[in-house]
């Protein structure tokens, strides 16, 4: 029936530089012509020379290493910072494409010195300058010619190209292989990331509204939405709401569960879905560390901290439930943490104390996230004072702190779990 909605339980001028060689040359010529010039006149010349040198420096500030940065350098950098901040937004407008292009053109016009000065509310040199892998290896899955049946894979997204290819792309490819009679397309919920990838790499990725518009324009009749999101959080709620608004445009719409499965409220319980995710993650983390098992790692004093994002949404209970799954599975050297420290038991200081109190001296940090993007590379494994790696080392409680920057999406066992979620949705009786 048209409009039917089924859910399997339904985020520089060098112009100011003083030409001292010319000044000195003129002085030498004057001395040859008038060798008996009075000392007072010479003194005046020297004073003027000093003043000239001082004046040439008033257009810039002295930088470490003797490099002078002019006001025009900073102005150029500030322009780019403003353009970046303008596209670091969650809403797409009719001006977004032009704004992304303008930001990239302005960045490309900067000198290396000017690029190093880019700083804004969100802007920094890494926005365009950081190498995150080959964007050309990624397929945005935004082609037309969809046909009657579409599986729309909805992800939060990442601007880290390698992770987008391996983690999100890996899930999408697994779904396409399992459902050859369906067209697989992509949508990101984070417009900030969509804009970043478009501006930096020239790759266009659909947001949910664009993907749904494309589906309608292509005459899609049966739409299945598979979120790669971890839980029933804010991003999941938003995606479901947007799809529901367009449900009447399709003959059937079904929405699959996120990775951790259906939501429930008991923080001290865990589900088979959560336990399966934890088992897959733990098995790979142990193997990457070179151990045969978690028990073997524990015997060597090694603990694992799986770091999620955290949220103020009621879905944060899923992190507590996953820690409950740790206990249920008998994992004595595994802890769940979150970047946001929500719930509170997942905050960095709490996790440091818990791991140390249990007697472990070696720690492996690994993301409990579908992608290994900004949070994994910076908040977890970065060198800043507030990264988890830095804080664990600074505590003085551990002999070693290692990181594994790998997203869940690249694990075959995790991809299989998404396929199971998808099967549950597509096999639901109409």
Image (tube, grey):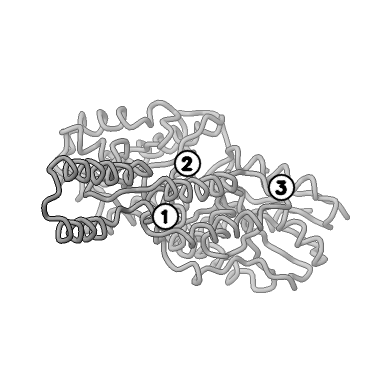
Q: Nearer the viewer, mark 3 or mark 2?
A: 2
Q: CA distance from mark 3 to mark 1?
A: 27 Å
Residue positioned 38% across, 27% down in the render:
345
Residue positioned 62% across, 44% down in the render:
90
Residue labelled with disc 1: 407
Residue 41: image location, x then y, percent: 19, 43
Would you say 126 lies left or right of 200 here?
left
The N terminus sits in image quarter: bottom right
Q: Nearer the viewer, mark 2 or mark 1?
A: 2
Residue positioned 28% across, 58% down in the render:
288
Mark with earlier residue (3, 1): 3
Residue labelled with disc 3: 7
Q: CA distance from mark 3 to mark 2?
A: 42 Å
Residue labelled with disc 2: 120
Residue 294: image location, x then y, percent: 26, 49
Residue positioned 43% across, 38% down in the render:
322
Would you say 181 lies left or right of 369 here?
right
Q: CA distance from mark 2 to mark 1?
A: 29 Å
Residue 164: image location, x then y, percent: 49, 60
Please report contact status of discs 3 and 1: CB closer than 8 Å, yes or no: no
């Amino acid at each position: 029936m048209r409009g039917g909605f089924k859910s399997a339980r339904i985020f520089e001028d060098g112009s100011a530089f003083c030409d001292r060689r010319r000044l000195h040359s003129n002085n030498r010529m004057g001395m040859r012509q008038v060798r008996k010039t009075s000392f007072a006149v010479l003194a005046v010349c020297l004073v003027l020379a000093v003043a000239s040198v001082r004046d040439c420096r008033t257009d810039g500030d002295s930088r470490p290493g003797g490099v002078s940065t002019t006001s025009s350098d900073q102005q150029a950098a500030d322009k780019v910072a403003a353009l970046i901040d303008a596209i670091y937004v969650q809403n797409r407008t009719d001006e977004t494409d032009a704004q992304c292009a303008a930001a990239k053109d302005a960045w490309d016009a900067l000198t290396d010195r000017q690029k190093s000065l880019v700083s804004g509310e969100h802007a920094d040199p890494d926005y365009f300058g950081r190498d995150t892998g080959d964007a050309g290896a990624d397929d945005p899955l935004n082609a037309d010619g969809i046909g009657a049946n579409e599986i729309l894979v909805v992800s939060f997204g990442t601007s880290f190209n390698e992770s987008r290819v391996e983690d999100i792309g890996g899930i999408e490819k697994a779904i396409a292989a399992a459902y050859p009679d369906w067209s697989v397309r992509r949508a990101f919920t984070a417009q900030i990331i969509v804009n970043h990838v478009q501006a930096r790499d020239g790759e266009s990725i659909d947001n949910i509204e664009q993907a749904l518009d494309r589906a309608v324009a292509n005459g899609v009749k049966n739409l299945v939405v598979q979120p790669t999101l971890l839980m029933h959080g804010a991003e999941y709620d938003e995606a479901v709401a947007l799809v529901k608004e367009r449900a009447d445009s399709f003959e059937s719409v079904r929405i699959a569960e996120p990775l951790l499965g259906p939501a429930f409220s008991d923080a001290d319980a865990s589900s088979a879905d959560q336990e399966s995710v934890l088992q897959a993650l733990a098995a790979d983390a142990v193997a990457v560390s070179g151990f045969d098992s978690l028990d073997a790692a524990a015997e060597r004093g090694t603990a694992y901290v799986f770091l999620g994002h955290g949220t103020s949404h009621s879905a944060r209970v899923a992190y507590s439930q996953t820690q409950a799954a740790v206990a249920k599975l008998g994992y004595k050297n595994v802890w769940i943490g979150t970047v946001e420290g929500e719930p509170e038991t997942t905050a960095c200081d709490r996790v440091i104390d818990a791991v140390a109190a249990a007697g472990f001296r070696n720690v492996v940090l690994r993301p409990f996230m579908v992608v290994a993007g900004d949070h994994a590379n910076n908040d977890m494994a970065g060198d800043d004072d507030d990264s988890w790696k830095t804080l664990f080392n600074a505590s003085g409680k551990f002999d070693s702190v290692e990181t594994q920057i790998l997203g869940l999406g690249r694990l075959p066992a995790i991809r299989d779990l998404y396929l199971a979620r998808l099967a549950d949705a597509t096999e639901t009786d109409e």
